[in-house]
Amino acid sequence: MAKQEADNPQIKPYWGPAGGWGSVNSLADILPRERVNPEVARELVRQNKPDGFMCVSCAWAKPKDHHPFEFCEEGGKATAWELTTLRTTPEFFQKHTLAELREWKDYDLEQQGRLTHPLRYDAATDKYVACSWDEAFDAIAAELKPLDPKSVVFYASGRASLEASYMYALMARMYGSQNLPDSSNMCHESTSVGLKEAIGVPVGTTQLVDFELCDAIFFFGQNVGSNSPRMLHDLRDCRKRGVEIITFNPLKERGLERFTDPQNPIEMATLGETRISTQYHQVKAGGDIAAMMGIAKFVIQWDDEAAARGDKRVLDTGFLDQHTQGAEEFIEAVRRTEWADIERESGLKKKAIEAAATVYARSDAVLGIYGMGLTQHVKGVENVRMLVNLLLLRGNIGKPGAGPTPVRGHSNVQGQRTVGITEKTELAPIDKYRELYHFEPPAEKGLNTVEACHGVIDGSVKAFIGLGGNFLRAVPETAAMEEAWPRLELSVQIATKLNRNHLFPGRVTYLLPCLGRIEEDRQASGPQAVSMEDSTSCIHGSRGKAAPASPHLLSEPAIVGALARRLLPANPHVDWDAWVADYSLVRDAIERTYPEYFKDFNQRLFQPGGFWKGNKAAGRVWETKSKKAEFLVPSDLSAAGFEDAPGRFRLMTLRSNDQFNTTIYGYHDRFRGVKGTRDVLFMHKADMAEQGLAEGQIVALEGDAQDGKLRRREGLIVTPYDIPRGCLGAYYPECNVLIAVDHHAEESFVPAAKSVPVRIVA
Ligand SMILES: Nc1nc2c(c(=O)[nH]1)N[C@H]1C(S)=C(S)[C@@H](COP(=O)(O)OP(=O)(O)OC[C@H]3O[C@@H](n4cnc5c(=O)[nH]c(N)nc54)[C@H](O)[C@@H]3O)O[C@H]1N2
Ligand SMILES: Nc1nc2c(c(=O)[nH]1)N[C@H]1C(S)=C(S)[C@@H](COP(=O)(O)OP(=O)(O)OC[C@H]3O[C@@H](n4cnc5c(=O)[nH]c(N)nc54)[C@H](O)[C@@H]3O)O[C@H]1N2
Ligand SMILES: [Mo]
């Protein structure tokens, strides 16, 4: 397929709802482009259903009582993307050197279609050439054996199944490496750290049923219309029950404003729509701690007044006494905080915060839903802790209809952490590994994503294995990372489509094509199923039925098993071949390793709605240091982690409605009114005037990290937008070049992609 240029840029406001006809049209647009085969229609009906396959897009929960079509626009696009009939064959690679392909856009690379053959990089011609699987595995094992395992990174991108992930983590540790970062390190690691410290579990405490029981939802920094559209059904049902939805987001995201259900013929025919948010607060990027402090301040003030009158208290004092630690200190800190500071740091007026606090104070069961708008900040962990503080004040954790509800990204990112893909020793099942497989796992902490980037740049990382993903494109510091990558001794990528990371070879380089989840996975014992864990800790089986994109593809478990067998000394306690032949044996191993989560794993694999792994905090058992739920006094009202200064802006790097992370489906961002381009800089009109910029003017951004390094992104179109003063918006991954690798969340090391200090260069 020929390269396709971005068409005719057009930027104008979008007035329609999320979902609706726009969503059907957008799907109708991508299906022919991907030249999908007729199987797609059949597969879409099986999506997210018991005994069907679990969507490869987001991790939102899959209901027990499903809709006739349990997929959304984005899930439909993801399915079409995987089932495309386009192919990236060895002939394609014969025609193009990597130097040439590095000039292509992300969109054009993936648009070539599915990879079909295992490939080796040939430095003499600067091309990939087809090779046999045996050659690839032998060469990779031969390269890895002499290396210090601590210099090898085993990345995972959040999509691979529980079975593949368990095997991958075990292989890495048996080899001697605990360098097991995954996309979670760039995403919800602030959740995993913050919730664990505060309430003793690294994940949200709620399930789908809590949407039926809540009476208010506080919604922070998550773009539901683009990134987890199936949740719009749950939100709409909440609205129909009169649940108040209070949203905090610098941008007026359409999915949080209005929704027309594309699956409801009456809504479609009448253009009926549901108003989603009942209050919409355009908080400054990094302003959520301040906003939540303001809400807490009102709640505490009203509680003082109620106590003085002898009325029912506003704080849940019984809960605070019995279940929490640090409440007095936190309440004192809230009392000390000045309104002027809250207003300045949140960008919100006291009156607006009072309106939100009023809803909070009168609701008995509140969900706190959030995404990257909280986690991807220097104070991302404190953002999460502050949301917990707020929920704890009124006992909103561990009761029906209430609790923190992080919206996870990749479809199995939470599950990968559950089954051992983690760089943290305390999260690895060390004792079980010893007991079941008789080896001594690495004891010291492995590298997270940021540390792995440092290692690539400083040369201490010698080899990189990627189980999916597009690491080089997803991480910060693009220029230095691309410059350093070719110094790797070994670069191995397991992937379904060609992406930019693949165009940066190491000394030895292999690109290994794998089956996608929608495709039939046939092994010695017959067709296999795999499993994943959704955002609400429910585990689902998934069975692919579509014909594989090429006869030369291997499944992810088969690739990991084959490599492990060559790399590791024989161990009578691990039969990799038997596991590859029958994945139910891997599930047995997972059950033996984590009996508390995976009891009767194989029997429950296809339980409708998934089976719940359980959650201590949901039952008010707190596995924290103090054995109570812990308050935290935030260290700062701003989550940005840097001072404001004249000419310095907070850049939010965003996803469009036409992408899945680094996979670019197209050049439209329907909800934000952008057509035909991704080179957009969203900016407040008053800031434009102050900077002397005109609409449509082309500018560059420069990183303002104050470390003496030049980081620059050219060619952005200045676009007036409804965005708080001092904040800018532009698309990820093209703007990652502006992010310093050291600009990350404290403690969790999540790159702080939602407040990047930048300057505009006209
Ligand atoms: N179609 C599609 N689905 C996806 C993905 C995709 O790329 N495409 N990606 C998947 C992945 S891996 C993930 S992690 C999720 C990501 O899903 P989200 O968590 O929604 O992530 P973003 O799109 O980065 O947008 C975050 C939202 O936070 C807002 N925001 C930015 N800064 C702040 C702030 O300081 N405070 C507040 N309150 N809000 C802020 C932005 O305006 C935006 O609406 O989606 C998953 N699902
Ligand atoms: N500036 C900025 N940077 C960010 C973010 C941000 O908001 N702003 N978000 C961060 C977040 S939340 C995340 S999760 C990361 C995402 O980082 P990654 O997970 O590394 O990136 P993806 O774009 O999801 O990976 C896409 C590639 O995965 C491969 N792939 C797709 N399906 C499969 C499969 O079934 N198996 C295998 N083996 N490969 C497959 C394809 O080859 C495709 O090219 O980016 C992070 N980076
Ligand atoms: Mo993510």
Image: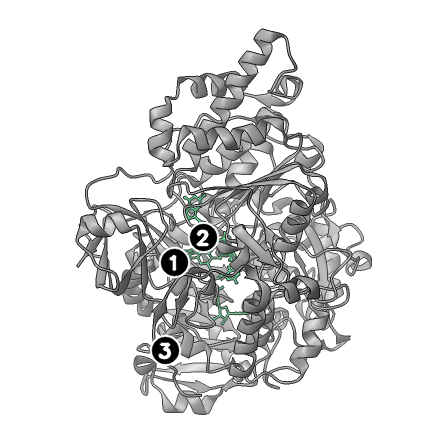
Mark toward the viewer: 2 or 3 = 3
At which x and y percent is residue 576? 66, 67
Q: Residue tagged by mark 3?
A: 7
Q: How is the image coloured?
A: one colour
Using residue 749 as the reference point, say whether residue 600 is left or right of it.
Answer: right
Say which residue appears at 70% left-offset and 55% top-offset: 539
Decide if ligand 2 comes within 8 Å of the CB at mark 1: yes
Q: Residue tagged by mark 1?
A: 475
Q: Badge 1 local density, few (<14 within 10 Å), some, or many (20+)?
A: many
Q: What residue type is labelled 3?
A: Asp
* Label 3 secondary element: loop
Using residue 44 as the reference point, say whether residue 257 is left or right of it.
Answer: left
Say which residue appears at 34% left-offset and 80% top-offset: 101
Q: What residue type is labelled 1?
A: Val
* Label 2 secondary element: helix
Q: Do the residues labelled 1 and 2 touch (CB within 8 Å)?
A: yes
Decide if ligand 2 comes within 8 Å of the CB at mark 2: yes
